[in-house]
Amino acid sequence: MTSDEPVCTDFPHLPSAARGGPFSHAVSRVARLHRIAAGRQLRSIGLYPGQELLMMHLWDAGAARQSELIKLLELDPSTVTKMLQRLEQAGYVRRSPDPKDRRAALVEATDDGCVLHERVQQAWTDLEEQTLAGLDAAERAELARLLGKVEANLCRSAGAAADCEAEPSCPSEAGCGE
Amino acid sequence: MTSDEPVCTDFPHLPSAARGGPFSHAVSRVARLHRIAAGRQLRSIGLYPGQELLMMHLWDAGAARQSELIKLLELDPSTVTKMLQRLEQAGYVRRSPDPKDRRAALVEATDDGCVLHERVQQAWTDLEEQTLAGLDAAERAELARLLGKVEANLCRSAGAAADCEAEPSCPSEAGCGE
DNA sequence: AAGATTACCTTGGTCGGCCAAGTAATGCGC
DNA sequence: GCGCATTACTTGGCCGACCAAGGTAATCTT
């Protein structure tokens, strides 16, 4: 069908065995570098990469059921459990049983956890600027658009297992008095 | 315009606390989804995500010093050590001491390891197409370009620790008789 | 030639992340 | 009311990935 030309457009020094997947390669590399950069920022704050996203949802929603976090973060339940155990031990999060449903757990950020809010925000802003340095507004918009499409694609192909359908989050300000 | 759906054009329902870092968010999500998709393909082959990149370099270069792999993959030495231990145990890789430098280890793919080559290649091609579905050539090129810039940015900021300078790989065909 | 430095790899620890099972509570059908 | 599926979370195991430290061998310095 479509001429399967070796679309090695203009890629630097790919592992070369990675012909056939230059973009996959690029995304892996970018993601890892991004994660490292994030990790560096977060470590000085007291979080590990990944935890900040959970905390963000918590700051956002006040208290949340664990299952809700799982859905929002699109993570494995066990991942969230362990993450919460560590965050709880670190004192950033508190869990309490839901009186309405005795198998569910309600999660909320502690005061210590809320204190991180600003710093995390700042770190993310910094990181964003670092990441996008040298890209003008149009390029940023285009990048966002393309990544959106890609995400949708991957979501769809992964959809077999878990739907990526998450209802729009309703940002309500509870939890952290801000 | 084959408008598939009102798919998250701009930005879906960001954790909202992630204002200030929408792109960082997007890249994280894309990377995770991509990794999951890759993992699904690879698992059926017998590899775990991440290992395929190492194998690619091996297929590419024949035998390589471990330090070389570390530089090419830009990974932590300990990561590569453990990965190799597992790959070795799985029978895909063989390590031998370098006679020229008794502290170095030479790594090469076994026959079993080389057998995976084709299938991995195929998996990556599939994944690439899944990922980029719906993007025309121009969009793909643009995405590649933008990701390249982003990678350079992140590399630079991470450069403090490890330089991202990797000399152009010289694809030589050794190792797997192919 | 002896000592300091650097390079190469390993070990041990921690985290995020997945899967596969397992436990407990809720809800549904009967 | 009773049993069964569903939901909610936990546990254990595994892997990739990081850091921090350590041990050994080559190289550089003096």
Image (cartoon, coloured by chain):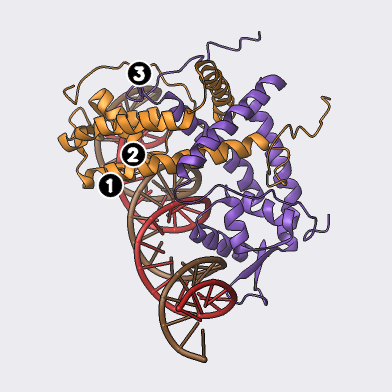
Chain colours: A orange, B purple, C brown, D red
Disc number for residue A86: 1
**Residue drawn at 51 percent across, 60 percent down:** B77
Q: Position of residue B84 (x, y in %)?
A: 58, 62
Q: Residue at x 60, y 37 (%)?
A: A26
Disc 2: which residue:
A51
Which picture quadrant has residue B66? Answer: bottom right
Q: Amino acid at mark 1?
A: Arg
Q: CB under 8 Å between callouts 1 and 3?
A: no
Q: Nearer the viewer, mark 1 or mark 2?
A: 2
Q: Chain of mark 2?
A: A
Q: Secondary structure at mark 2?
A: helix
Which amino acid type corresponds to the residue marked 3 in the rendered image? Answer: Ser
The reply to whether dot 1 and dot 2 touch (C-beta < 8 Å) is yes
Crowding at dot 3, Cα within 10 Å, few <14 / some 14-19 / many 20+, comes out as: some
Q: Are marks 1 and 2 on the same chain?
A: yes
Q: Is B177 left or right of B36, judged from the image as shown?
A: right
Q: Is residue A92 left or right of residue A160?
A: left
Can you see residue B122?
yes
Q: Earlier in the sequence, mark 1 or mark 2?
A: 2
Gap in angstroms between the C-alphas marked 2 and 3: 19 Å
- Check the residue under mark 3 and report the chain it is in: A
Residue B5 figure quarter: top right
User: In what element is the residue under mark 1?
Assistant: helix
Q: Is residue A113 left or right of residue A68?
A: left
Residue bearing the label numbered 3: A169
Compare residues B103 and B57 and report the one nearer the observer: B103
Tell me what residue is drawn at x 21 percent, y 39 percent: A92
- Chain letter behind tag 1: A
Q: Quadrant of residue B98?
A: bottom right
Label placed on residue A105: none
- B87, B142: nearer the viewer: B142
The reply to whether residue A78 is visible in this rendering is: no
